[in-house]
Image (cartoon, helix red, strand yellow):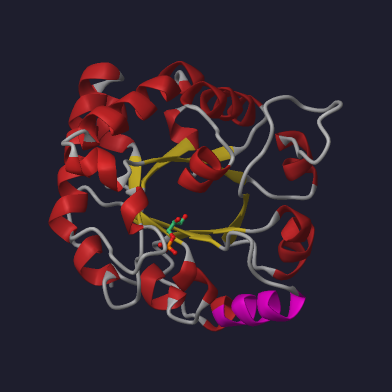
Amino acid sequence: MGRKFVVGGNWKMNGDKNQINEIVNNLKKGPLDPNVEVVIGVPAIYLAYVKSIVPDTIGVAAQNCWKVPKGAFTGEISPAMIKDVGADWVILGHSERRTIFGEKDDLVAQKVAHAIESGLKVIACIGETLDEREAGKTEEVVFRQTKALLPAIGSNWDKVVLAYEPVWAIGTGKSATPQQAQDVHASLRNWLSTNASADVAAKVRIQYGGSVTGATAKELAACPDIDGFLVGGASLKPEFVDIVNATQ
Ligand SMILES: O=C[C@H](O)COP(=O)(O)O
């Protein structure tokens, strides 16, 4: 069975109720390809609001969470809280969390483990910086970041989507070429067949993220190892519908 295409919209720290209403109305109007899974990553404060207005066919994700259920962690939210307001997903390990907030591989892994054990599905992000790519270290970095996740995911790969997001392509307007993205996705899948299992490698969905637009999505989506997108800026715009429908 083929891997179901999955497109995430990561709104990051954008949107107010007016803009959210516009985005959701646009998604409702679609039409969205029913064969594509759609998940929107919403600022925590709007999770409950978005859940109350979005059709159940669209998944709702938090953009981060903490690694335990509750306690003295001022400013944090837990997977239990995310579930309590009706959301089913969380984005973890985004490069902005890693670079701006200093999240290391082991913390990301702890968050992934706790999110899964709490019943959330996880979009786990990995990707190299420009310096790392230019130093020929893309695979080394992506494999290291993924390796840290292996014990956290265990046998729960069906709850996880990997998002390959080269940091140099995020918010820069400079997407990876389809070949660059395909090459990393293929070598990651190959690495997973050795380090997880052939079954995991065949089944896990790997999204590409980094300056995806309505104009670039079709060519990227045609690559055999690209199973969806994690979209930042364009997920706030009407063209997100075109990105969802990129395989049509
Ligand atoms: O999570 C999404 C990525 O950071 C991509 O953002 P972008 O589409 O604005 O480049």
Horizontally, is 42 left or right of 139 in the view? right
Q: Where does the N terminus fall, quadrant-wise?
A: top left
Q: Quadrant location of the C terminus?
A: bottom left
Picture coordinates of residue 13 (x, y %)? 64, 61
Give above or below for 204 relative to 170.
above
Which of the 4 image quarters holds residue 33? bottom left
| Total count of labels | 0
Residue at left offset 79%, top offset 49%: 85
- Looking at the image, which is closer to me, 238 or 199? 238
Report the predominant secondary structure element of the magenta stretch. Answer: helix
Decide whether residue 23 is among the magenta residues.
yes
Quadrant containing ligand 1 reads bottom left
Residue 206 x, y percent position in the rendering: 33, 44
Q: Is residue 29 visible?
A: yes
Q: Is residue 122 left or right of residue 191?
A: right
| Range covered by the magenta-colored residues | 17-26
Residue drawn 18% across the image and 37% down it: 135
Q: Residue at x 67, y 79 (%)?
A: 19
Query: Residue 22 in magenta?
Result: yes
